[in-house]
């Protein structure tokens, strides 16, 4: 693996290796000293054209816990305010010889272009409505830790599939690991050709009890203004996951941040079957594993914490 | 000490121990290598919902000089733009297992809530009009270095006490250390029940010569628009600290940033009795001592600078 | 050298020493571990009042590759929003005892004032229309690597000389190293007394083939609104550097970011004679050399990469 642009680039074996490494790093995260020296002297650039608490912080911490140096760029406060093009920005940053560039941007496909303009390893941290492959990896990791394997597991992806890069990456990723994926939501929020991805399609939650895992997507307020939805109240009445609909058996996942009272009821967020905080915690170790895979995997691996004193 | 939410949580002995450690760190700050390895491998999150040059930079440097990793969050550029709630933000960040979270926010009491949502040590870096305990600690440290002890010292806190978290924390802190506190300002800017805090109240500076220390508060321009003040000119004519009012004997303090020509005359800022820059310098070492207290105090303490070469 | 405020402060010998060090650092940049421990334990503050991808990232990486700690300030998100003056900001930051402060601001001459308010070494990273000395140094370094020496080299600086701090620093820097400088542009964009700098002046590109090096300046869109130019289209028709005008022999430079289709044609940016990406790459190593010169030059110099494992 040279880049992580799409979950389609990654084989099942790749995913299993990344999850195994994430599990090894996870043990370090229980200790007082959570750092390992694996990427000491390396530089990771975070190039973010969109706001993100979870993803940027998760990558920044992942890189720092591998002892890499991190430089953050956000669209505001950079030359993008002067109209610099993405290509020029990337070539400029690339001339500084970073080892990896983590790209979050509103343009589908941009990370693949970026990979052509630089020698650095590129990680797609979300590109428009296209993909968000580290989200899929951390969700697979979280589920695998809980269930052992995804083979034959029934996962319902619920909500705004049409506009969701998470949905796209996760459907592909879950299927790669052997799960059976169903998508459910109002017809206006499901892509017309979605069956071609090999999923079942439902327009109600009547059979949600069949699901081993309910993966709720974030609902963007903007959708209502764009007339995809008559009202948030109606959406919630038909598709909000609450304790009653979830039932006692299904696990609950959500990529965050949650709109409480919209796609999830307030109570269900912290219910015993909710894996939401485990997903967030998985973010750091899975991204550590991805950075390690791209930048250091050919070297001997020794995830021992850095010695504590000077 | 698990958290630093309020100056009320800290005993006189705690304050004395923190000041002693800050003094030890202060000696390192005179050297070329100012870093100590005390918090190597630890992570400090700065979660700032309000702009602040002094406080954020001071915490960031304090953490870095203890060899901790620092991740900064500000409200702009994070998921708060997407309407994520404080609780969800904190739970997300907390899932990344930081050792400490430094919180600055406009909501009084929020740091105490944050402390319930995470295992990390929480430091209140200013919450609305409520408290700013590290400011009180660094002011106590600065004064103690100069005067030896605060027992019986007469401190006048002058200006907009009503809206000031610094005033609240400092009055409580100064009293804890044995000082006699007087507050002075226009009646509209003093809380009605302020005598209950055990302070004397004055509505003019006629007796300011009694003060050993004059602690001037920052005047917010917004107050005038909100009709707390007839005009800044009138405020300055009655309550601005200038050389004549300060006299030759009293020490001068201010939490910064100063509005020159409003609460302080331009000349008095840099006068020989001004401790203003000493307060700023104290910010880093006192915050190092607080981080050390919360994260490392149970371990052996050895503030020796990190060895210089590789 | 205590500060780098202007290219005029630097002797030809200083420039040669800085370039030699940059060349030494450049060899490390080819290795997997690009860090050297030269400034371990030191603190570099980036104080930026203007947006900049190239310059800030370049200084940040330079400092981190020397193992220094870096703290970034930008005007938004700091106390400047509360109206804090430059002097107070600098005195505050200075009380934190940084070793160097890198200043980018819209006020010509401000870095020299900053140097009077602090003990830190000050590096001017661009002040209004005045100077940008590290840009001149990295351009000299880039050209010297290609040509061996600048003695007698003919350099044309083309475009908006009037508003360009890069033009001012580079003309002085190129001349210091023995080059013959010509400026060319529309009369409204050349300073009236520019001959006093010892340059030739041309109002067309008719003789551009005489140039060994063409240094194109960035054209600011704002200039047209301010009536310096009738239109961008007319400017481009007369002064845009394209393959035909550049010819086969002249080298091409530009400080970036490029306005493709304005001062440079799209094709010429990546042509074989273009040094534009080499300039960007030079940014990190030249700024490493400047930081080293100001903070560590008196100590033994050993640019060996940091040992890799813990």
Image (cartoon, coloured by chain):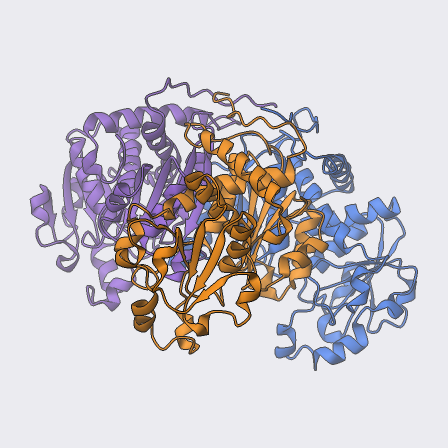
Chain colours: A purple, B blue, C orange
Residue sitting nearer the eye, C263 or A124: C263
**View extreme (bottom): residue:** B230
The quadrant where residue A237 appears: bottom left
Which image quarter is the N terminus of chain B in?
A: top right
Which image quarter is the C terminus of chain B in?
A: top right
Q: Position of residue C60 (x, y in %)?
A: 51, 44
Q: Position of residue B81 (x, y in %)?
A: 41, 58
Query: Is C77 displayed left or right of A89 in the figure?
Result: right
Q: Position of residue C143 (x, y in %)?
A: 44, 44
Depicted A271 relative to depicted B215: above or below: above
| Residue at point 46%, 20% (across, down) | A304
Depicted C165 relative to depicted C221: above or below: above
Q: Where is residue C203 in the image (x, y as percent from the top left)?
A: 41, 69
Residue sitting nearer the eye, A273 or B203: B203
Query: Is C84 displayed left or right of C254 in the figure?
Result: right
| Residue at point 61%, 55% (across, down) | B53
The quadrant where residue A280 appears: top left
| Residue at point 34%, 38% (across, down) | A279
């Amino acid at each position: 693996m040279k880049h992580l642009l799409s979950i389609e680039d990654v084989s099942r074996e790749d995913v299993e290796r990344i999850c195994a490494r994430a599990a090894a790093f996870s043990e370090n995260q229980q200790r007082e000293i959570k750092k390992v020296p694996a990427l000491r002297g390396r530089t990771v650039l975070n190039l973010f054209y969109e706001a993100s608490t979870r993803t940027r912080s998760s990558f920044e911490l992942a890189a720092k816990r591998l002892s890499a140096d991190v430089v953050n760029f956000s669209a505001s406060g950079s030359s993008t305010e002067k109209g610099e093009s993405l290509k020029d920005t990337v070539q400029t940053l690339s001339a500084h010889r970073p080892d990896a560039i983590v790209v979050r941007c509103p343009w589908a496909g941009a990370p693949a272009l970026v990979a052509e303009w630089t020698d650095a390893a590129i990680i797609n941290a979300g590109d428009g409505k296209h993909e968000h492959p580290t989200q899929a990896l951390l969700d697979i990791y979280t589920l695998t830790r809980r269930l052992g394997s995804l083979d034959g597991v029934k996962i319902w992806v619920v909500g705004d599939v049409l506009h969701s890069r998470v949905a796209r990456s996760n459907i592909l990723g879950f299927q790669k690991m052997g799960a059976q994926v169903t998508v459910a939501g109002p017809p206006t929020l499901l892509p017309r050709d979605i069956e071609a991805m090999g999923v079942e399609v439902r327009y109600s939650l009547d059979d949600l009890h069949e699901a081993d895992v309910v993966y709720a997507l974030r609902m963007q307020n903007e959708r209502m203004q764009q007339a995809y939805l008559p009202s948030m109240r109606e959406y919630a009445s038909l598709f909000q996951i609450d304790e009653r609909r979830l039932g006692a058996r299904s696990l609950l996942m959500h990529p965050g941040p949650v709109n409480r009272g919209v796609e999830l009821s307030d109570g269900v967020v912290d219910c015993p079957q909710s894996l939401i905080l485990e997903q967030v915690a998985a973010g750091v170790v899975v991204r550590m594993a991805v950075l390690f895979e791209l930048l250091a995997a050919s070297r001997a691996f020794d995830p021992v914490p850095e010695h504590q004193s000077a």
